[in-house]
């Protein structure tokens, strides 16, 4: 009788281990399938955001580009991409130079805490990232530089 109880306990533990292994296998298969389906899009988005971060960091750390942004008059804000040629040409050139050719990138300079929105997106995927340019050695006038990229 004692031998019979021990045998039943062993069978119970074996079934529990089998169920656990089955759950782990099913979860692994589902994770592999879902990550394979969503991975290219997430990697592409991550690459765009990293590129935008690098471009904005480059502008943020360059004294002459910072000064150009800080010299934009408050009444000209938000400064649209088309107006960069006259107000911030070096910033415009830098963004064009550092942006990948398969993306259409633009930017705006806005006042902090004011909307900085891209108009006319035509239902395209827009990737946006911003950085604060607040001061240089002689001037404190915080602004937001927001970069927009659209996949062509």
Image (cartoon, grey):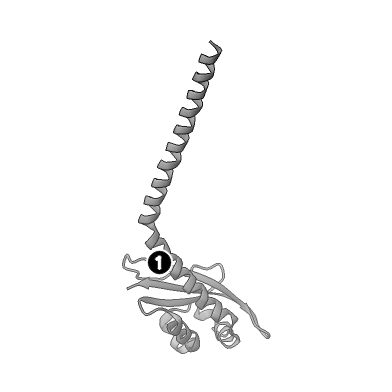
**SS type, badge 1:** helix
> Most extreme residue toward the front, as rendered?
3
| Residue drawn where x is 48% and y is 28% of the image | 14
**Numbered-mark total:** 1
x, y percent for residue 115:
49, 67
Instruction: Specify whether 111 is left or right of 18.
Output: right
Which residue corresponds to the image point at 32% horizontal and 73% vertical from the top-left?
152
Q: Is residue 69 above or below residue 35?
A: below
Residue 92 or residue 13, whichever sits in front: 13
Badge 1 is on which residue? Answer: 44
- Mark 1 Cα-neighbour bin, 10 Å: few <14, some 14–19, many ≥20: few
Q: Position of residue 134 (x, y in %)?
A: 62, 76
Residue at the extreme right of the image, as rendered: 137
Q: Say whether residue 6 is left or right of residue 23.
A: right
Q: Percent from the top left, x then y, of residue 109?
A: 50, 77
When the figure is inspected, residue 44 is found, relative to residue 62, above or below; the finding is above
For residue 43, above or below residue 100: above
Q: Which residue is depicted at the point 42% across and 49% down?
A: 31
40 displayed left or right of 90: left
Q: Position of residue 132 (x, y in %)?
A: 58, 73
Q: Nearer the viewer, residue 105 or 89?
A: 105
Residue displayed at 56% across by 70% down:
112
Q: Nearer the viewer, residue 141 or 94?
A: 94
């Amino acid at each position: 009788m004692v031998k019979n109880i021990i045998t039943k306990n062993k069978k119970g533990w074996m079934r529990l281990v089998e169920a656990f292994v089955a759950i782990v296998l099913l979860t692994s298969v589902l994770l592999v399938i879902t990550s394979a389906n969503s991975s290219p899009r997430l990697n592409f988005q991550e690459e765009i955001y990293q590129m935008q971060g690098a471009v904005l960091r480059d502008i943020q750390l360059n004294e002459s580009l910072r000064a150009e942004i800080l010299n934009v008059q408050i009444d000209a804000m938000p400064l649209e991409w088309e107006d960069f040629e006259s107000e911030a040409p070096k910033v415009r050139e830098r963004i064009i130079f550092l942006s990948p050719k398969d993306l259409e990138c633009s930017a705006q300079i806005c006042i902090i805490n004011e909307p900085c929105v891209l108009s006319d997106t035509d239902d395209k995927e827009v990737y946006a990232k911003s950085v604060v340019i607040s001061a240089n050695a002689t001037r404190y006038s915080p602004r937001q530089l927001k970069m927009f990229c659209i996949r062509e």
